[in-house]
Image: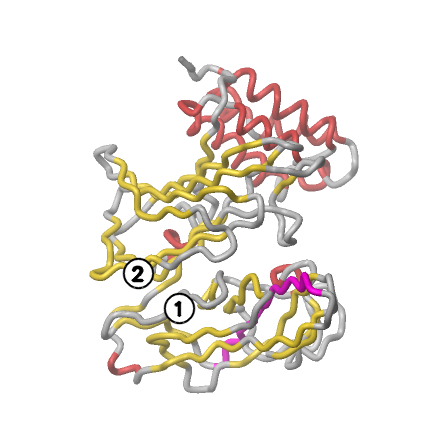
């Protein structure tokens, strides 16, 4: 996938590919992209034919490189990440899987290859990104693998400030993790991933202070994440700019992600979902606010901002860490109801009407948070 990046500019490109009619079983990948590359990702989509229009109804020749400045997921439906690399020169997410373990790509499924480049030079930059997939016969497959992609969107860093974003996801069944890699942008000062055992014992499983070239930690033998345990990721940020920074795709935004291949495949684990398919994420605050103060803060923020924005995430971060379960239940409910029961009232522009609807729809969650004790 080749392109030319203009001097001093940022580029997001996409290109679609289709799996052969017989399907593929991937046992490894080699990833290569040139200097200036921030990442190259390969997504699986629900499409079984190359679309002639994107999800916004815009005609596009998807078999050639096209602009994805709003992100691959804004132009195309995707249901999983199936490969790529988050750092220049690394071995990639699916470097080599154990014998008999592979990622299954269904017959005719469409894949999206997505690149992100930043040209900081004064000359045009010719770039070439490639993902070579190594396959194996289907009869040799013993265990299907998946790709963990933990993505914390609840983050915000104040102007000239420092902040931490922490998120936890449950492990519903035993899985074995093959490798781990983080992803942040330029304000990322440190990344830490931990495994919290059912007994409560916490073990560090990955750490780095490099946002630009985060290392891949290869786990040989693969590391067991036992059923009932929890994965926590923490990103620490330092913002040297006179503006707040929040989650987003651009280099001017921030991210907090943990990526790693594992087996056997478990959709709930890799998507951080509960049995119903809703998010199971828990966000951990670092402040001292009580449950009642946090619920009031969330409501006030949505009223002022006419939706979820910087101030809303500030409320989550300001909550006492012991209230993570109760506060997260409120946030999950707000997000779900804004997209469902309260969608019409929240998209109509009347912030107070939206908050009123959410207060009614999430009454049980808000009540539980208000009455939760903080030390």
Q: Along the line of sight, which residue is nearer the eye, 148 or 329?
A: 148
At 58% from the left and 34% from the top, the residue drawn is 334
Near mark 1 (Cα within 10 A), the count class, few <14, some 14-19 or many ≥20, is some
Q: Residue at x 42, y 79 (%)?
A: 133
Q: Position of residue 179 (x, y in %)?
A: 33, 59
* In the image, residue 69 above or below residue 164: below
Residue appearing at x 43%, y 39% in the figure: 234
Quadrant placement of the C terminus = top left
- The residue pinned by badge 1 equals 91
- The N terminus, quarter of image: bottom right
| Main secondary-structure element of the magenta-colored stretch | strand
All told, the count of numbered labels is 2
Q: Residue at x 70, y 70 (%)?
A: 5
Q: Is residue 120 magenta?
A: yes
Q: Dot 2: few (<14), some (14–19), or many (≥20) neighbours within 10 Å? A: some
Identify the coloring. secondary structure
Task: Tell me if 40 is positioned left or right of 198 in this view.
Answer: right
Magenta residue check for 15: no
Mark 1 in CB contact with mark 2 (< 8 angstroms): yes
Q: Which mark is residue 246?
A: none
**Residue assigned mark 2:** 218
The answer to which quarter of the image holds residue 90 is bottom left
The image shows residue 121, relative to residue 374, as above or below, that is below
Q: Earlier in the sequence, mark 1 or mark 2?
A: 1
Q: Is residue 118 left or right of residue 150?
A: right
In the displayed structure, 288 sits above or below 93; it is above
354 relative to 80 in the view: left or right: right
Residue furthest to the right: 349
The magenta stretch spans which residues? 108-121
Q: Please give left or right for residue 87 compared with residue 304 in the image.
A: left
Q: Position of residue 97 (x, y in %)?
A: 30, 70
Q: Please tell me in which quadrant of the rendered image residue 240 appears.
A: top right
């Amino acid at each position: 996938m080749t392109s030319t990046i203009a001097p001093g500019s940022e580029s997001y490109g996409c290109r679609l590919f289709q799996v052969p009619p017989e399907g593929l079983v991937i046992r490894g990948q080699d990833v290569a992209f040139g200097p200036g590359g921030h990442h190259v990702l390969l997504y699986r989509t629900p499409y079984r034919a190359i679309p002639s229009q994107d999800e916004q109804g815009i005609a596009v020749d998807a078999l050639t490189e096209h602009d994805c400045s709003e992100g691959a997921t804004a132009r195309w439906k995707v249901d999983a990440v199936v490969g790529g690399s988050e750092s220049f020169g690394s071995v990639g997410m699916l470097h080599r899987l154990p014998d008999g373990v592979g990622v299954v790509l269904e017959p005719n499924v469409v894949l999206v290859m997505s690149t992100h480049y930043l040209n900081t030079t004064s000359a045009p930059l010719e770039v070439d990104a490639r993902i070579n997939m190594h396959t194996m016969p289907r009869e040799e497959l013993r265990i299907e693998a998946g790709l963990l992609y933990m993505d914390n969107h609840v983050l915000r860093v104040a102007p000239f400030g420092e902040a931490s974003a922490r998120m936890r996801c449950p492990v519903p069944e035993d899985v074995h993790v093959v490798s781990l890699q983080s992803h942040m942008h330029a304000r990322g000062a440190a990344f830490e991933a931990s495994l919290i055992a059912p007994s409560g014992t916490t073990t560090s499983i990955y750490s780095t202070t490099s946002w630009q070239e985060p290392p891949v930690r290869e786990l040989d033998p693969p590391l067991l994440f036992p059923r009932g345990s929890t994965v926590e990721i923490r990103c620490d940020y330092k913002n040297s700019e006179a503006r707040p920074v929040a989650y987003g795709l651009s280099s001017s935004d921030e991210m907090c992600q943990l990526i790693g291949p594992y087996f056997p495949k478990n959709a709930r684990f890799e998507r951080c979902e509960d049995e119903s398919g809703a998010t199971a994420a828990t966000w951990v605050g670092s402040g001292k606010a009580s449950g009642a103060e946090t619920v009031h803060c969330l409501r006030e923020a949505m009223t002022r901002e006419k939706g979820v924005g910087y101030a809303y995430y500030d409320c989550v971060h300001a909550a006492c860490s012991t209230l993570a379960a109760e506060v997260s239940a409120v946030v999950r409910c707000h997000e779900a109801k804004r997209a469902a029961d309260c969608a019409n009232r929240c998209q109509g522009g009347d912030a107070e009407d939206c908050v009123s609807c959410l207060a009614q729809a999430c009454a049980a969650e808000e009540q539980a948070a208000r009455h939760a004790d903080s030390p």
